[in-house]
Structure formats: structure tokens, C-alpha cells
Image (spheres, rainbow, N blue to C red):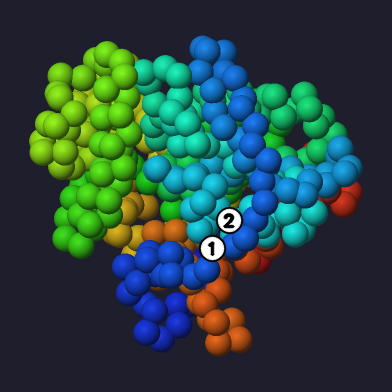
Amino acid sequence: MSRATVSADFHAPRGLHNCHVQTLLPRLRPLTALARDTEILDLPDGDFVELAWVRPAPRRQDAPLFILFHGLEGSFDSPYARDLLSAASTLGWRALLMHFRGCGQALNRLPRAYHSGDTADAYWLIGQLAKRYPQAIKVAAGVSLGGNMLVKLVAEQGGDGLDLAGAIAISAPLDLAASADALNRGFARIYQRHLLKSLHDKIANKMSKESLPINLTPQQLMRQLDSFWAYDNQVTAPLHGFSSASDYYRRASAGRLLGEIELPTLILQAADDPFLPANLLDRLPVPSDAVRMEITRQGGHVGFIDLQKGRLSSWLTRRVVRQLQDWTPITRPLRPSISSS
């Protein structure tokens, strides 16, 4: 491991070591109750994203602000989203989740949707938040697809290009081609099938309402596009200006940019994540000094479940809380450093 890559302090309890058990366990826990206000944020191209603001919100305009970007086909109702947003709110942070286009309560307006390297909407949101809350320290977190997007965004914008004090990426597929391969093997195909079903249903719904640049009928989508390679080649690429799935994966993967990151960034990954290849780190460049990559032996994909007082608990949430506490503006440093805890 490089000096920017360290072992994290998560240890799966006996009987919960398996990566698939860890991946599925969060869905077995009760969903954290959380109230929200919904906002439609219009985008420069005429489309919109739906924001979910945790209620009640802090009264202070300079309260720190936590921005969460979900994973593929995720939403405010994803278990990790409820946990992380609730924890940030409990700390006194103003917390919100940005739904990627079409992932909120309504389909988006334009034929296009969202993808792993689509940083423009997040950039627009953070710019709007900078105008609304100029005195508030801001931290963004991204999970899975949202994590890859966030890492790519902070690499593109440099240390001063975003009004963020830091970024947190969780279980991010930093090499998209390698992740597509991993999800097409063994038990991981179950996850692939589940996610593709949601994508197929959504794009078929759109195709029934408007013409799209896709050379398949809605009925052919499910039968022929049975892998991410096939779906991204036939749907994601033509909808978003890529020539092929390979072109999309190459241009959208954030891992190749790790050495260019200037903003303090924490990356949390499990070595046994079934969505990622086992040799992921060997495929990536050495991270810059602004990056701290914490690797756990177990944890699965966005799992990291342990036991606290005999009950299932989220180590992931506690780790993110610890990072937010380190970044809370007590003395308002210009660029807080990453905690070594």
C-alpha cells in the first residue's frame, strides 16, 4: 500500500464476514425514519434534478452542509442514504441528497438520463449552494456510482474549483470496465440483474413516451441487454454522446485521476467488494497527497455492518460521522486535513 492507502479499523463480526452477507445486510435493518422537503432544481439545459432536504433544517445560515450523491438507481430511500443523512443532521449539519436525473419521484424531462462520469449536475448544484450558503462549510459524499462521479468532479475542478472543504467516496467503482466485468461473474450477476431490471423499466417507460436514439424495442431491452457491457453499449453510450461502452468506461472512470486530486478526499473501499475486481488498486495510479484511501478486509459493497450492543450497526455511518466532526468549522481552517483516525 502507498502512504495514502491504509487499512481501516472495520472488522466484520463472526458469521458476517461474507461479502454478499455484508452487501445485503443493510436492507435487512429497519429503514431510518427521516422527514424531508423536496425541491426541484432546474438545470441549464432545461432538465431538472430533485433534491431531498432533511427536515428539520438548522436555523443558522452558516450551519455546515452535507451533500450526498447516491449510487446507481439509488434514492433518498436507500438504506445508506437514510443513515448518512440522519447522522449528519443529528450532528447539526444541513443535509441533502441530490437525486440523479430520473431517480426522484418523476422522470426527468430530456431523453438523456445520468451516468457514472456525469459531473455537470453536481457542479451546478454545488455552485447554487455556494450562493445560498456562502458562509457554510460544505462536504460532499458519494456512494458507489455517486462516489466515482464525485472523485472525477473534484479531480476536474482542482483544489479551489468547488466550494467544498472535503469529499468522501464510498465503494466507488473507480475502474468502470473492471467493475462491469466483476458484476458479470458468479453471484454478482444477481446484483447486475437487479440493477438492470430497474434501468430497463425506466428506459422502456421513456421509450413509450418519446423517440430515443436506441436501436432496440422495449421488449428487446430485457432479452438482449443482460450485462452492463451490453446495456452501456446500446443505451448509456448513445444517450450521452459516447461511441461505445468502452469509450464511456474509459472517459467516465475516475480512478485514472487519483493522482490529480487537490481537495482533501477520503475514499472508503472494501477489499472484498463484489462490485469491484480484487486487484482494483493495482489498476490505479498512486493517489495524490490530498487523498486518504482506507481499505477494509471485509465489508462488501456499501455494507460495513458490525454489531454494537448486540444489534446490527453501520460502521460506515460512524466513520463518516467521525470525518464530518473533523471537518466541523471550529476554527474554520481553509482546507482541513484528513483525519488519521
Of badges 2 and 1, nearer the viewer stands 1
Position of the N terminus by quadrant: bottom left
- Element marked by disc 2: helix
Q: Is residue 81 left or right of residue 57?
A: left
Front-lying residue, 169 or 239 = 239
Q: Residue at x 27, y 51 (%)?
A: 194
Mark number displayed over residue 31: 1
Q: Is residue 58 left or right of residue 118?
A: right
Q: Which residue is mark 2?
A: 82
Amino acid beneath label 2: Arg
Front-lying residue, 180 or 50 = 50
Inter-mark Cα distance, 2 to 1: 7 Å
Q: Earlier in the sequence, mark 2 or mark 1?
A: 1
Residue 40 position in % (x across, y down) = 61, 27
Q: Are marks 2 and 1 in contact (CB under 8 Å)?
A: yes
Q: Residue at x 82, y 29 (%)?
A: 134
Mark number displayed over residue 73: none
Q: Is residue 234 left or right of residue 333?
A: left
